[in-house]
Image (spheres, rainbow, N blue to C red):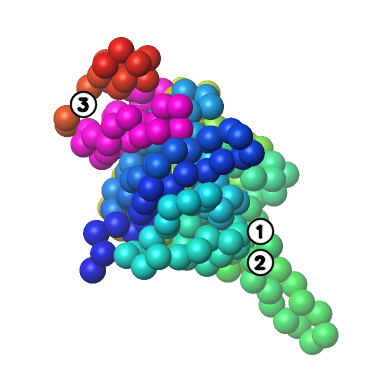
Amino acid sequence: MAEYRIEIRNVSKRFGSVVALDDVSFGVRPGEVVGLIGDNGAGKSTAIKIISGFHRPSSGSILWEGEEIVMDSPEQARSHGIQTVYQDLALIDSLSIARNFFLRAEPKIKLGPFRFLDVKMMNLKTAEILRDIGIKDLNPSTPVAALSGGERQAVAIGRTYYFGGRLLILDEPTSALSVKQTQKVFSIIREVRSKGAAVILIEHNMIHAHEISDRLVVIRHGKVFGDFKKDDVSVTDLERILAGVA
């Protein structure tokens, strides 16, 4: 059995004369949260776009569960179980939690020549999924517009996990959240991790990244400047590495 769910080896990416990534290597194990940290322009977004199929690397390789793969498109990435939750969350405020969960994959009931949305099934299944990741206080029929920022993140993470998320990429999930909401999101991340999902967390907040991650990968100027177990590095150490003084 392969050690890593996904691994990138010696990956570089060039856009003309600009080197966005330079010989980057790291992996993520099943049931592990890896914090990918770095300043704006460090190369985090490029690395994630390569993993999620938006860019092909100029050189290097991508391995999925030990087998080298060519990631040609986001659709191919999703077929492997790679799901990304972006900062905008891609939720529709006017629709319920359940409708957002099953957006573009709605179950239907056929009555004669007509087909109708199976709202009852969507509500029941959504409630089951939410309970499965530790969310017991949300009514699936509630409009997303009525949710807090932390609850929106919970819905987005739950949706991606349900639809085959074996590797979840979370883009700044605690941005603009309160302390209480941040802890709720962390509890959901821990829950999906406990069920075997691999998680890549992109995070600018060093305290948050250190709290929730099992390992931390520091990218600076397109290169990996450190791959640390959480207990082997402090927040101050991370800040010094990012500042180039360590």
**Secondary-structure class at tag 3:** loop
Q: Is residue 135 left or right of residue 104?
A: left
Whole-percent x, y for residue 29 in the image: 29, 53
Q: Disc 2 versus disc 3: distance between alpha carbons?
A: 45 Å
Query: Which residue sits at x=56%, y=53%?
Result: 56
Disc 1 residue crowd, few under 14, some 14–19, many 20+, Cα 10 Å: some
* Callout 3 amino acid: Val
Q: Which residue appears farthest toward the left when viewing the image?
A: 232
Q: Are marks 3 and 1 in contact (CB under 8 Å)?
A: no
Residue 59 appearing in the image = yes
Q: Disc 2 versus disc 1: distance between alpha carbons?
A: 6 Å
Query: Which residue sits at x=58%, y=33%?
Result: 18
Image quarter of the C terminus: top left
Q: Which residue is mark 2?
A: 106
Q: Which residue appears farthest toward the right when viewing the image?
A: 113
Q: Which residue appears farthest toward the front when viewing the image?
A: 17
Whole-percent x, y for residue 7 in the image: 36, 54
Q: Which residue is mark 3?
A: 233
Query: Which residue sits at x=45%, y=65%?
Result: 69
